[in-house]
Image (cartoon, grey):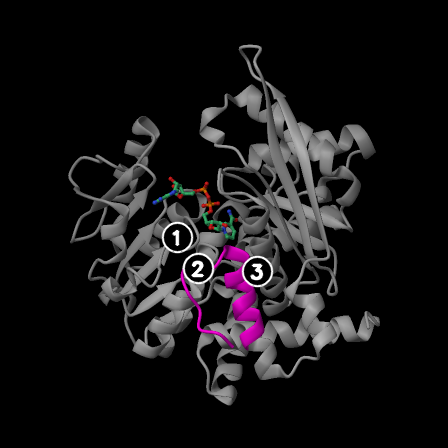
Amino acid sequence: MAEPHDEMTPFEAVTFFFHEAADAADVDDATREILSGTYREVRVQVPLRRDNGEKHVFYGYRVQHNGARGPYKGGVRYDLSADLDETRALASLMTWKTALVDLPFGGAKGGVQVDPRSLSSPELERLTRRYMSQVSYIVGAHRDIMAPDMGTNAQTMAWMMDAWGQKAGHDPAIVTGKPIALGGSVGREAATGRGAIMVLDEAVRDAGRERGDLTIAVQGFGNVGSWAARIAVEDGYRVVAVSDIGGGIYVGSGLDLEAVDRHVEEAGTVAGCPGTEPLDSGELLSLDVDVLIPAALGGVITKSNVDDIRADVIVEAANHPVTPAADHVLRDRGVEVIPDVLANAGGVTVSYFEWTQNIQQFHWDADRVNAELRKRLRRGYRTLLDFADSAGCDLRRAAFGVAVDRVAEAARLRGYL
Ligand code: NAD
């Protein structure tokens, strides 16, 4: 296979990891074609009348990558980077993620290419309802279930559920990540960040290290990054730096996250939080910390900055934060990279619990949600380690190896070919 490089698009990068696993698993050509492509891609126009009367047309996507193991599942992103290629990459990662943690789902992703901060709340509501309406003919509680991702949240899911209900009848299982008052699951909001720390806990225990000795830097302070930071502090780690699109902050003895939350509430960014030193997002990545948690955008650790990375563990809470070219450098240097398909699988796992609760019309309590989450992620981590041990490979190649085997087997059993 050709050497990876930083000019790869997000979908080329994810597909590169797939091909590495497919080569090792000896997947036949037709199966390889199915799994390296996408099943269905929809691009929709999402017209919006702004509050001031101006008319604007946005573009939205829904990509269904593979449904061999169950209904398509994946979030919806509102971001300027949410184009077709990025959506394909994220849909493909969902297929491998749901397979690795053994959820009965396939992989999908959606997005609207928009900066959500440039819209008012009523504009976001109209945009969301229109997007849901435009893709409604390919989604469904047993066909394709959406969830929050960057730029979307529980409120977005509430609007989506309502828009679907007006068309097809009320069904809370149509989306996950809803507000609890509308059938959301306790623990869903924190689940992706919590899952990232649960997986880190496994690695720390295996390495015989103590949480209290470990420093952490987190890039991104949205849903995933802020919960990962909070739970890490609760668990005894020392979170010394966090950042968001407005900038970063550092305190060597550990950040007071309650003070950071209060500052974000007022200022809308972590930057400038009193009692902290300023950082830019690039500096955060190269801090001398034990654990680095990228929890914002994809493609932030590249061949050009990988040599600056000083952490010896990277927990990929964001999707595809490390390019394949940088990944090879980290692997050769022996940096332990816990890959996105496991590190951020906590979100889709609790989404699965939410979907199950909606179908059963039953509620689980927080203890049950978190205990089941830990069990699933621990099993995923152990499966991955066993594969890595027997194949003599690193965790990323093991993760893709396990997932590709499972999806290829499901495709074969269903008689795709
Ligand atoms: P979010 O919109 O809630 O937060 C994104 C954060 O990233 C914000 O703090 C934003 O300011 C920050 N950010 C954006 N650009 C930045 C930059 N250049 N430098 C530093 N920070 C920057 O999104 P989220 O839901 O927390 O998602 C974050 C990542 O986690 C994404 O890669 C997403 O695909 C992935 N993910 C999310 C979930 C979920 O359940 N929400 C599940 C799995 C994976």
Quadrant location, the C terminus? bottom right
Q: Residue at x 61, y 39 (%)?
A: 178
Please report the bounds of the magenta region as a residue range: 1-20
Q: Tell whether 3 sits left or right of 349.
A: left
**Could you give the CA–CA distance between mark 1 and mark 3, rounded to whole angstroms?**
20 Å
> In the rendered image, which residue does mark 1 sit on?
228
Name the spot of residue 382 as percent of width and height, x first. Answer: 51, 77
Name the spot of residue 348 as percent of width and height, x first. Answer: 59, 55
Q: Residues within 10 Å of mark 2 (few under 14, many from 20)?
A: many
Q: Residue at x 18, y 35 (%)?
A: 274
Q: Amino acid at mark 1?
A: Ala
> In the rendered image, which residue does mark 2 sit on?
196
Q: Quadrant of residue 183?
A: top right
Query: For residue 352, which numbered disc appears in the image?
Result: none
Q: Tell whether 331 sits left or right of 364.
A: left
Q: Quadrant of residue 102?
A: bottom right
Residue 8 colored in magenta in the image: yes
**In the image, is residue 258 above or below residue 203?**
above
Q: Nearer the N terminus, badge 3 or badge 2?
A: 3
